[in-house]
Image (cartoon, helix red, strand yellow):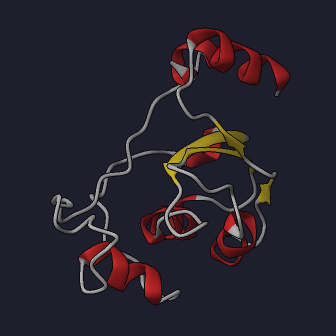
Amino acid sequence: MIAEEAKADLFEIEPKVPYTKADLDWMDKKSRSSVEMSDKKYRPEIMKKEIDMSSYDEILLGFPIWWYVAPTIINTFWKPMISAVKDRPFATSGGSGFGNTVKELQPSAPEAVITEGSLLNRGTKQKVSEWVNSL
């Protein structure tokens, strides 16, 4: 809905090794997501897709909140793809806010301007439209 409302290109960040339901079990300290999130330097591999980021000056970056921050795969995407753009993150969350998301994303793309994000839980068409028009 956001890409449609913003008349923006849509790009999906895909992990090289897809996550299973067991991988995403945040209650299991040995699950893949728990292990990844406990190591702030870990960067899961992503599927390589040809995308010329130089033609963009603003990115709407969406992701779920994991442990009060963006999943580590978002940092994987940031590092080689983004250099000097304005990023407007948005996220969904089961109960937490953005926490330290911006602080933890910034080192992966030091030149990028990352604004404080917005939670778009249960985003209706009206809520999405209002958010996009507020940018």
Q: How many marks?
A: 0
**Position of residue 33 measured from the top left corner of the image (x, y, whole percent):** 33, 73
Name the residue rendered at 58%, 11% in the picture: 125
Name the residue rendered at 62%, 59% in the picture: 82
Name the residue rendered at 74%, 24% in the picture: 131
Instruction: Relative to 11, say whether 70 is above or below.
Output: below
**Position of residue 95 measured from the top left corner of the image (x, y, whole percent):** 57, 52
Q: In which quadrant is the C terminus drawn?
A: top right
Instruction: Relative to 4, say whether 85 is above or below.
Output: below
**Position of residue 37 measured from the top left corner of the image (x, y, whole percent):** 44, 79
**Position of residue 75 measured from the top left corner of the image (x, y, whole percent):** 53, 69
Q: Nearer the viewer, residue 130 or 30?
A: 30
Q: Nearer the viewer, residue 7 or 64?
A: 64
Give the residue furthest to the top: 126
Q: Nearer the viewer, residue 116 or 86?
A: 116
- In terms of image quadrants, where is residue 104? bottom right
Name the residue rendered at 73%, 41% in the picture: 57
- In terms of image quadrants, where is residue 101? bottom right
- In terms of image quadrants, where is residue 12? top left
Would you say 36 lies left or right of 115 here? left
Would you say 14 lies left or right of 123 here? left
